[in-house]
Amino acid sequence: MGKIFENISNKQKNWIESQKIFFVATAPLSKNGLINLSPKGLDTFRIIDSVTVAYLDLAGSGIETVSHIQENQRITIMFTAFDGPPKSLRLYGKGEVIKFSSDSFKKMASYFPNHLGTRSIIKVDLHRIQDSCGWSIPLFEYKGDRDVYDKYCENKGRDKLVGDIIQGNKKSIDGIAGF
């Protein structure tokens, strides 16, 4: 049985910061809507304080997370140990989309490395932190980050990326407003 915490402890913070991948889950309000689950990496996650986290939202295959958060704010972030002792940690919260064009973007962006493909920052105010055993999670060896995304963005250029974001991110696959 997992334990529930009111805030991220220093021990949890250190463990989270050592993870190379995390997963983000959101869902629309509609019972017929599709639940979205996305893997994330590339050093894009930050702990702002013991009850606030944020990650870079990189332009990619869809606008589901942004659309769902704008509609209902619900988000769950999960970390799981692929090496060392077994463990999973879920962060439940209310998300906020900080758009590239907003006044608060620059301040929040200072927490992160620069990624040309950044379209927004997802900030999450946590209301539940829960760990679980992770006993059934297999062991994997981390070999390094892929450079494909950054090369793709460099080849495309920021102006073309922004155009693609504006054109391709208007609605989620369920028709919920995006950018």
Image (cartoon, rainbow, N blue to C red):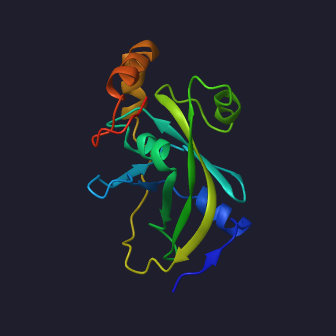
State left or right for residue 152 relative to residue 117.
Answer: left
Q: Residue 127: x and y, percent?
A: 63, 64
Residue at x 36% of width, y 28% of height: 170
The quarter of the displayed image where residue 50 is located: bottom right
Q: Residue 141: x and y, percent?
A: 41, 61
Nearest to the observer: residue 83 or residue 120: 120
Residue at x 50% of width, y 58% of height: 77
Hey, which residue is sitting farthest front in the picture?
Answer: 30
Nearest to the observer: residue 120 or residue 33: 33
Residue at x 50% of width, y 55% of height: 74
The quarter of the displayed image where residue 31 is located: bottom left
Nearest to the observer: residue 132 or residue 7: 7
Q: As displayed, is residue 87 above or below residue 34?
A: below
Q: As displayed, is residue 178 above or below residue 91?
A: above
Hey, which residue is sitting farthest bottom in the picture?
Answer: 1
Q: As displayed, is residue 46 above or below residue 164?
A: below
State left or right for residue 72 relative to residue 11.
Answer: left
Hey, which residue is sitting farthest top in the picture?
Answer: 159
Q: Residue 19: x and y, percent?
A: 53, 58
* Picture quarter with the C terminus: top left
Q: How many numbered discs sit on the rendered protein?
A: 0
Q: Residue 57: x and y, percent?
A: 49, 38
